[in-house]
Image: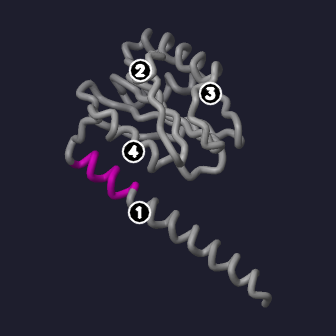
Amino acid sequence: MKPYQLDIFYDHRAVTESRDVIQEALSLLTNTIKRKSFSLTSCQAVKSYCRLHLATREHEIFGALFLDSQHRLIEFRELFRGTIDGCSVYVREVAKEALSLNAAAIIFTHNHPSGVCEPSQADIQITKRLQEALTLFDVRVLDHFIVSAEEVVSFAERGLM
């Protein structure tokens, strides 16, 4: 075996081990949040939570944190998977999930694998469509976060909501 092939093997192994550690941390964090009725009232706490879930993904994932009336996490779900630079989001499917979980509020999140967290016009438009639709069911949209490995951008902090 050539030396550079061995290096690639070790790099792959390190990446796999890192992903395993991250999955374990996410599992522990989610269980702690559910067990202690943790309220997601801090923007920084939500940013950290979203970053843990999505920052290292190689394709776009659109997800939601479904919350009860006290903003305690009911469940985080990855709703849609896209490509490296886009993801289709279906309002009907999001509404069905919110109703099935009896959510009172939602925080949306998705990643930009490119590393650029600037909201696109498509990001802004789908957030408004989701907000309008979910209002009909008395489900409040609290924020939408765009995640990359370097940063997390909040629509609410940017005045986009």
Residue at (39% x, 44% y) in the render = 49
Say whether disc 1 or disc 4 marks the residue closer to the N-terminus.
Answer: 1
C-alpha distance separating marks 2 and 1: 29 Å
Kindly identify which numbered label has been placed on residue 89: 3
C-alpha distance separating marks 4 and 3: 21 Å
Residue 13: percent from left, percent from top: 60, 75
Amino acid type for the residue under numbered disc 4: Tyr
Q: Residues within 10 Å of mark 2 (few under 14, many from 20)?
A: many
* Relative vertical location of residue 33 with respect to residue 69 in this rendering, above or below: below
Residue 119: percent from left, percent from top: 58, 26
| Secondary element at image label 3 | loop
Say whether disc 1 or disc 3 marks the residue closer to the N-terminus.
Answer: 1
Q: How is the image coloured?
A: one colour
Say whether disc 2 or disc 4 marks the residue closer to the N-terminus.
Answer: 4
Where is mark 4, residue-wise?
49
Where is mark 2, residue-wise?
141
C-alpha distance separating marks 2 and 4: 17 Å
Residue 87: percent from left, percent from top: 66, 33
Amino acid type for the residue under numbered disc 1: Glu
Amino acid type for the residue under numbered disc 3: Val
Say whether disc 3 or disc 2 marks the residue closer to the N-terminus.
Answer: 3
Amino acid type for the residue under numbered disc 2: Val
Q: Are marks 3 and 2 in contact (CB under 8 Å)?
A: no
Assess whether residue 28 is covered by the magenta stretch: yes
Residue 100's image quarter? top left
Residue that protrudes farthest toward the bottom in the picture: 1
Say whether disc 4 or disc 3 marks the residue closer to the N-terminus.
Answer: 4
* Relative vertical location of residue 141 with respect to residue 35 in this rendering, above or below: above
Kindly identify which numbered label has been placed on residue 152: none
Where is mark 1, residue-wise?
24
46, 132: nearer the viewer = 46
